[in-house]
Image (cartoon, rainbow, N blue to C red):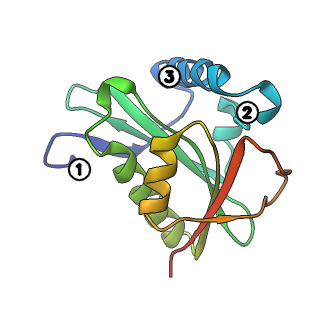
Amino acid sequence: MPDADGIRIEIEDPGRPDVVAALRAADSWYATLYPAESNHLVDVETLRTVDVTFLAARDGDGALLGFGAIAARGGYAEIKRMYVDPAARGLKLGRRLLERLERHAVDGGFAIVRLETGISQPEAIGLYRSAGYRDIAPFGEYRPDPLSLFMEKWLT
């Protein structure tokens, strides 16, 4: 069901051609911010695995505005690949995607959501902090990286 402004956020296959193109564009943007060893991006095939749910935000005409994924990681869920098209910024779409991802985590039985983001993304950091995320040490397979921030939020 669309929001009042006609935007739909739904589970989708990340292999759709427009999503793949947007993922590539996001990858290119991240590459301008961070060296390869500090880019912790996952590819389309990883986003298609059974433990990952991929959400896409589309306008009333079906144009892709943004996306995000959440992965089951044992005792917590991890947000991956949050991105909003620059043309769609200002619509509070990042917050809406984040809230939907968190709801999906709760529905999946998770009380903790974690994420990694880069220090050169002040808007993303501000979004996460305003939504209740707190800095933590590296988790999972991540190692300390001066260009990364690791965050978590307890949902219940």
List x then y, in percent, for residue 148.
Answer: 71, 45
Mark 1 neighbour density, 10 Å: few (under 14) some (14–19) many (20 or more): few
Residue 61 sits in quarter? top left
Q: Is residue 54 visible?
A: no
Mark 2 neighbour density, 10 Å: few (under 14) some (14–19) many (20 or more): some
Q: Earlier in the sequence, mark 1 or mark 2?
A: 1
Q: Residue at x 81, y 45 (%)?
A: 145
Instruction: Using the image, determine if residue 60 lies above or below residue 125.
Output: above
The residue carrying mark 2 is 39
Gap in angstroms between the C-alphas marked 2 and 3: 17 Å
Instruction: Using the image, determine if residue 32 lies above or below residue 81.
Output: above
What kind of residue is marked 1?
Answer: Met
The residue nearer to you, when weighing 12 against 85, is: 85
List x then y, in percent, for residue 2.
Answer: 21, 46
Q: Residue at x 37, y 52 (%)?
A: 95
The residue carrying mark 3 is 22
Q: Residue at x 76, y 25 (%)?
A: 35
Total tally of numbered discs in the picture: 3
Residue 46 sits in quarter? top right
Answer with left or right where residue 8 lies relative to residue 28: left
